[in-house]
Amino acid sequence: MQQKAIYLVTVSVFFCICLPLFLPSLSLAGEPIRIGVYLPMTGPVAAFGQMEWAGIQAAHQMHPTVLGRPVELVLVDEKSDRIEAANAVSRLLKKEKVKAIIGSATSSNTMAGVALSEKAKIPMVSPTATLPLVTQNKKYVFRVCFIDSFQGEAAAIFAYRNLKARRVAVIVDRAQDYCVGLASYFKKAFTRLGGKVVSIAYCQTGDQDFSAQLTSIPASQSDLLYLPNYYAEDALIARQAQELGLNIPILSADGAQAPELIKIGGTAVEGLYLLAHFAPEGAATPLAKEFMKFFKKTRHEETSGFHALGADAYFVLLDAIKRAGRTDGDAIRTALASTMGFSGVSGVIKIGPDGNAVKSAVILQVSGGQFRYLTIVKPW
């Protein structure tokens, strides 16, 4: 009897001491894991944000839980503006208390939020910010797209070898870090191959008249026009080039892959080449096939590159949380950094030591009012 009493006392003491240690995990079992999203849902590059958000939402519908808990997405519109982007990240961190962040779509606005995320030690995954500076010397910032140094070199090689271009004119949006950086990488690689950039002219986001930049190109005897800009400016430049009778091929970048390029550009963008992150014809992973089928069924449209990368940002982040086994920033960050061979929607993704995705690119061409797949370019 005495032994039984001692046993009961021992068990009671054990539970009194240990139960509080288990209570937090027990109480969190049904609570959602909050993931913040900041994207340009309005403003000049709203098309990027809206497409990425559609991809993220579809991915969330497919995989709505992790660690046995529901995932809650919290979206804040950064309005295509750097200051608003910083405000959006601040709100997600301080008010919404998110465990990780997806965003943003453009490099400049992603960089506006990076410092805040780093300071709070909350991991951030950008779907499409391609400028190398976004992740440079950062510990908690990652991306699922290729970077501009790779994209610029790939564009130069395609221009020189496939299009046989030797003299290139470039019009650059100097208001965007992405455009300026991409033009620089292209020029270095194209010159190294033996080609020559014979004309560089500048514009600003929101410009409507490009006649001054275009009228000097015929005299330069360029055989290719390279436009490393976003879709709105590239579409207007193409239209005005057509009106001026400038009949040379146009090569652009991933920032031009939006339906608005074709809506605004019309017949002037027929034949335009661009580098991109994804093409349905080149999608080979089981997740890509599953996602495209789900997206078509629920959204009644085909999967674009921005849809795919928005989805991949969510899927890669969810995979990291699952492998981490918990939701603190350091654990998620460590899991993200060790991502290897993740079969995403846009291809197989490996996260390099600098937080950049190592993956292939595709070349598209506008034909018949659609983006058509031409070929694939692998990292070297």
Image: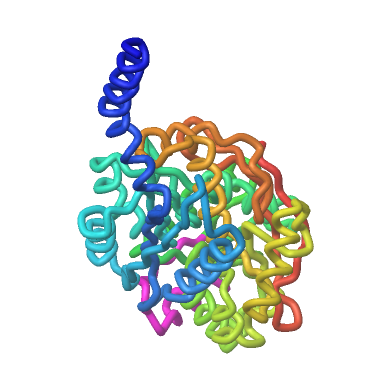
Seen from this angle, which residue lies furthest front? 1
> Is residue 214 found inside the magenta-colored segment of the image?
yes
- Quarter of the image with the C terminus is top right
Residue 248 makes an appearance in the image = yes
Report the residue at 56% width, 78% height from top.
261
Which of the pair 104/230 is nearer the observer? 104
* Number of callouts: 0
Report the residue at 42% width, 62% height from top.
73
Relative to residue 191, is residue 84 depicted above or below? below
Quadrant in the picture for residue 40: bottom left
Report the residue at 42% width, 48% height from top.
29
* Residue 96 percent coordinates (x, y): 27, 59
Which of the pair 60/334 is nearer the observer? 60
Relative to residue 342, is residue 262 depicted above or below? below
Answer left or right for 236 relative to 78: right
Which of the pair 96/31 is nearer the observer? 31
Answer left or right for 137 relative to 63: left
- Give the image's coloring scheme: rainbow
Report the residue at 58% width, 84% height from top.
265
Q: What stretch is highlighted in magenta?
A: 199-218
Quadrant in the picture for residue 34: bottom left
* Residue 160 percent coordinates (x, y): 69, 52
Residue 148 makes an appearance in the image = no
- Quarter of the image with the N terminus is top left
* Residue 183 percent coordinates (x, y): 48, 55
> Is residue 378 found inside the magenta-colored segment of the image?
no
Relative to residue 58, is residue 127 depicted above or below? above
* Residue 228 percent coordinates (x, y): 51, 62
